[in-house]
Amino acid sequence: MSAPAPKEPFDIDRVLSRLEAAVAPYPKAAMFELAELGYDTPFEQLIACIISIRTRDEESLPISRRLLDVARTPAAMAQLTPEQIDRLITPSTFHERKSYQIQTIARQIVEQYGGQLPCDEQTLLAFSGVGVKCAHLALGIACGQPWISVDIHVHRVTNRWGYVAAPTPEQTMVELERVLSREHWVTINRLLVPFGKHICTGQLPHCSICPVLDMCQQVGVDRHR
């Protein structure tokens, strides 16, 4: 049995270029899709990300649109009761808890920031229910700021490539900030979410159709398609 072919040196620019074509046939990550549909303010992106927590993109996208079509600004959202918000965001996971968080955030923005959510990381992280992933996504997409948002797909794929070696998404973010050029910090999430969902899957990844197999170290991959 012949030895496997040696891997090409890992070149992140070539990798991301290939992924652009590879993920084109698949649905976009929900937050980026929302932005393309015009829901692109920091407030809309933050609320949509809260809705998406523990909820599949296929569900969170229409749920977010349903809520935002009723209230697209903090002032309008603050006028809704948590019960009204809850009815609009069901069946998002933890929808009842999220409805109170969303209404509270809207009221805080109105009372503390004059109804305009500033593009500031610490401001977003100070809101109840907002973690680093959502804050960074909203700032990256709506504000054009270079922030890395690491979900399970970004964590799994970058470690599988051997590009970073980190046991948790939080540590993966730290490692990516160290090795990845800032120009790719938002792009890495936009591309790796659909890539991780449809090609570099958690179980039985589709290595036979992977466009970057020649550079991937396949860390932890015992079986694949």
Image (tube, rainbow, N blue to C red):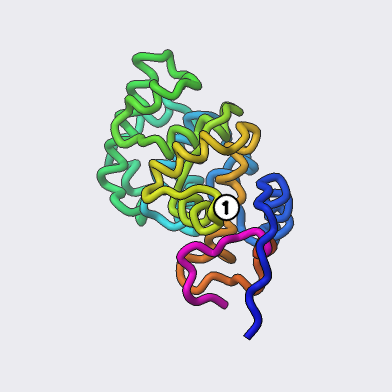
**Which stretch did the figure color magenta?**
214-225
Q: How crowded is mark 1: few (under 14 residues within 10 Å), some or many (20 or more)?
A: many
Query: Could you say where residue 165 lies in the image, as x and y percent from the top left?
Result: 45, 50
| Residue in view at x 45 percent, y 35 percent | 46
Position of 158 with respect to 97 (left or right) is right
Occupied quadrant, residue 144: top right
User: In this figure, which residue is indicated by the disc labeled 1?
Assistant: 192
Measured along the vertical axis of the image, is residue 77 above or below residue 154? above
| Residue in view at x 53 percent, y 44 percent | 31
Occupied quadrant, residue 183: top right
Q: What residue type is labelled 1?
A: Leu
Query: Could you say where residue 128 lies in the image, as x and y percent from the top left?
Result: 29, 32
Looking at the image, which is closer to me, 129 or 81? 129
Looking at the image, which is closer to me, 65 or 29? 29
Q: In which quarter of the image is the C terminus?
A: bottom right
Question: Furthest-bottom residue in view?
Answer: 1
Position of 151 with respect to 144 (left or right) is left
| Residue in view at x 72 percent, y 55 percent | 18
| Residue in view at x 53 percent, y 75 percent | 224
Q: Helix, strand or loop at disc 1?
A: helix
Measured along the vertical axis of the image, is residue 24 above or below residue 134? below
Looking at the image, which is closer to me, 48 or 223? 223
Is most of the magenta stretch helix, strand or loop? loop
